[in-house]
Image (cartoon, grey):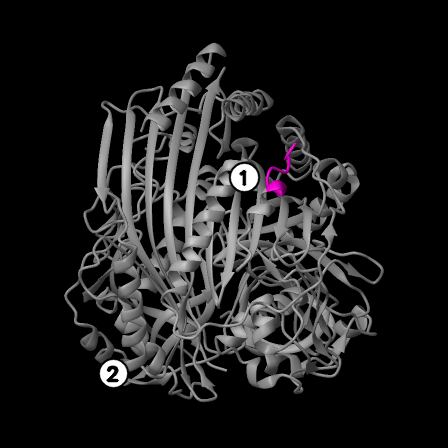
Amino acid sequence: MFNDVIKEKKSLFDTSVQTVLRQQQNRERRVILMNGNLVTNVRTESSGICGNVYQNGVRGFSSIAECSGEAAEKVLKAATENAALLNGHLDTPKAAYSKTSQGIAIPNRLIEDATQKQIIELCKKVDSYVAEHYKDLVSRLIMYREDSMEKYIYTSDANDGHVSYPRCMLYIGMTKTTKEGQPVEVFGSISVSAGLEKAFSNFEIIRKEIEKTYKQVSDKAEGTYADAGYKTVILHPDVAGMIAHEAVGHTVEADLVRGGSVAGPNLNKQVASELVNIVDFAHTAFGKDIGIPVYLDDEGIVAKDAVLIENGILKSYMHNRESADFYGVEPTGNARGWAFSDEPIIRMRNTMVLPGKDKLEDMIASVENGYYLTSTGNGQADLTGEFMFGINMGYEIKNGKLGKAILDTTVSGVAFDMLKTVDMVSDELVVNAAGTCGKKQPMSVSMGGPAIRCKLMIGGR
Amino acid sequence: MEKLQDVLTYVKNLLQEKNVNQALLSIEESNTRELTYENGECSLLRTLFGQTVGINIIKNQKNGKSQINDFSKEALKTAVETALSSAEAGDADVAYAFAKNEEDLSICEGVLDSDMEKLLERVKELAHTIKKEYPKVQLIQLIASHSYTHRLVHNSNGGDADIRQGHYGISLEFAGNDNDKTAGLAGHFVAFESLDKPLIELDGVRTCLQSAVDELHLAELTDKFEGKVIFRPDCASQILAFAINCFASTQPVLSKTGPWIEKLDKQVASDNLTVKLAPMDERIFEKSLVTADGAWSKDYTIIDKGVLKQFDIGLYVSNKTGFKPAPNDGSGMIVEAGDTALNDMIKNVKRGLLVGSISAGRPSGNGELSGVAKNSFYIEDGEIVGAVNETMISMNLAELVHNIDAISREVWNTGSYCMPYLCFDGVNISGK
């Protein structure tokens, strides 16, 4: 049990400043089986308290790896002193954060902690299945990872709350060799915003992912290099989600807009085809929980959806309290910190391209010479909107039909140029909750979308 | 000291009660102070009090680990139980082992106490210098920090370590900016031990800032060709780390895949390339002094004149495969200076790029790597023509390291690596 030890310390808040006190626990469970060998078997728990004090435009922050009333008092004192120190160096004091709603949020889900035995048994079951059914693999890797977090948040002038974010992921890696003896690998994954039992009790779902992964690695072993250049591509929903996150999402985080991102001068302008709609959902989409639901952020702001692009027009940014005041809008509840020792910064939550009306098969049939890109690795974006992400799996499209698989490559483009080339959007929405975004701190995020047809640069030979 | 020693003794006693004879324990406390400068002012000051307990045990040849950051007796008891139950849940494997050390280790190095007033002055001075000398650079964020750690390690196979370390670090994020024209995002990190000189003089800072300004002037590059690429030291260290991870680390060695698996003591790179992994080198401040297996880190040469001398693997993979375990965990990459001045290196490029960073996915198991050339410049007939955008480069890392054309005299020492510019031939370059 992770018990609240900070509630009573609200009475110690300095009334001349704006304060947030947060108690947080992160739990990580990790098991890796490499060719059946248990190479990683670890359980990590990290908990502590932080204080975040805003005074005249500067912030003092302090954290301590201890959950007690005394620890809370220590970080409040240190954070307040840090703010006062910087305040002494300020040329021009700024106003306090604007008023916001005040209330109490309660968790919509709880963390269910699986034992290490359950985790290892699951991994061994998956590994045995793969080893038994696919003997031509040169190596296999099964990885389970859980990175759940739970927080108590108390604020001087916003909402208080208790929130939790359970998440577990299963990765299935398979390696085959090409005719030339070169290794090629493909990773399948399943991620769920829940605990192990709820996420993986149905082996049929895992079996389907295993079969899909094996087919892909077999196709890839017969694969060819992509022809480098500017190509027409169909992006699978998983890849379109990466577009929403990397190509658009980062450029419209308000702190990066202030840093000079290309989104700054483009607000309320046409930046994409009219078929493109992108939303950073807080917690609910199409009537149900989506990805990693965020109801209250770490500044005590009730999270609401941020509509980023509507019918191709850039409509708004994602905000914390500071940036919302700077731009004269309401905060969107995007401020989150990864660990108790991390200050909240603007982070995406569940960033999605919205579905359109096209059918995937029609989209593939429409391409004379291009690629269907189905799986992506990591990605990066720039202030200029230039983005890249790795493509781990994809297929040639020749005369409207899928051809050979392609070997690993990278795609890139400039967000607001590429989005203008979108001319077909499929009618399905696929959400991937396995994302971990890196921006000073890691952060669990989800992303997704339909399949889209567009043009971008593809690497290769 | 007393607190850490008390925790260590308490955990050792708990393990003894549970008849655990093989354990690797790490008890650490840390104090970090971090100053953030953004939007034209020092806007955030953080003080972080940290502590961790790592418990790694082998019982009945089964291995389990737990890590917490709570020193209370109740939490320590739970952590010991967690490590035991984790081990119990796994299978026995004779390959699980901890390293053996002949003697204890006691190290106290670096700057243990921070001078925050001085650091604050240096940060304001750096921001002022950038504004004055590089007016076309937009400083997005500057983070300056001091971190101190005190760590006790107990290895039941031999050796206790008492390590105190402290150093400063700065991380800069910036971009060239001229009215509505913005260059690509750029960054630089340096670890250092002294505040005696202005931060602008730290290795690589001026070069990266000037690069951001120069990136505002674009060159036209629309075709696809094979050419030479000069990797800036920060990018060169990334490329070599990619190659080592791709061909010589746990996964390729344990699964016996990849182009280097049969190449120990054989040529895997140009004979002008020697790569050391040397955390104990006096130029390295960001380092791991104890391996994950509990060995005291020692420097070693992984590639000597192009010959692969060692895999970057731990004791478990070593026991599984028969290859020697690496003497450290892979930090502190050092390539010594070559004999070519950077300017001469550029003059020798008919067509190619000077690449500051590469935005790329993880290389595949066979070493194929393609990515976007960022903070990069087009070179033609020995002259830098201008910056490139939307330009991709692709290469096979196993082939690339055989094609080292030149190594520069200029070396960056950033406290986490020492690296010259490296020029490689045979890279595919593709403009839009």
Confirm whether residue B224 shows in the render.
Answer: yes
Marks 1/2: CA–CA distance:
56 Å
Chain at tag 2: B
Depth order, front residue of B33/B87: B33
As shown in the figure, which amino acid type bears the numbered disc 2? Gly
Instruction: Locate residue B228: give its quadrant.
Output: bottom left
Can you say whether A135 is above or below A91 in the image?
above
Q: Which residue is mark 1?
A: A47
User: Does the magenta-highlighted stretch encompass residue A2?
Assistant: yes
The residue segment tinted magenta is: A1-8
Disc 1 marks which amino acid? Ser
Camera-side residue of A424 and A10: A10
Membership of A453 in magenta stretch: no
Q: Main secondary structure of the magenta part?
A: loop
Mark 2, residue position: B382
Q: Secondary structure at mark 2?
A: loop
For residue B404, say whether it is visible.
Answer: no
> Contact (CB < 8 A) between labels 1 and 2?
no
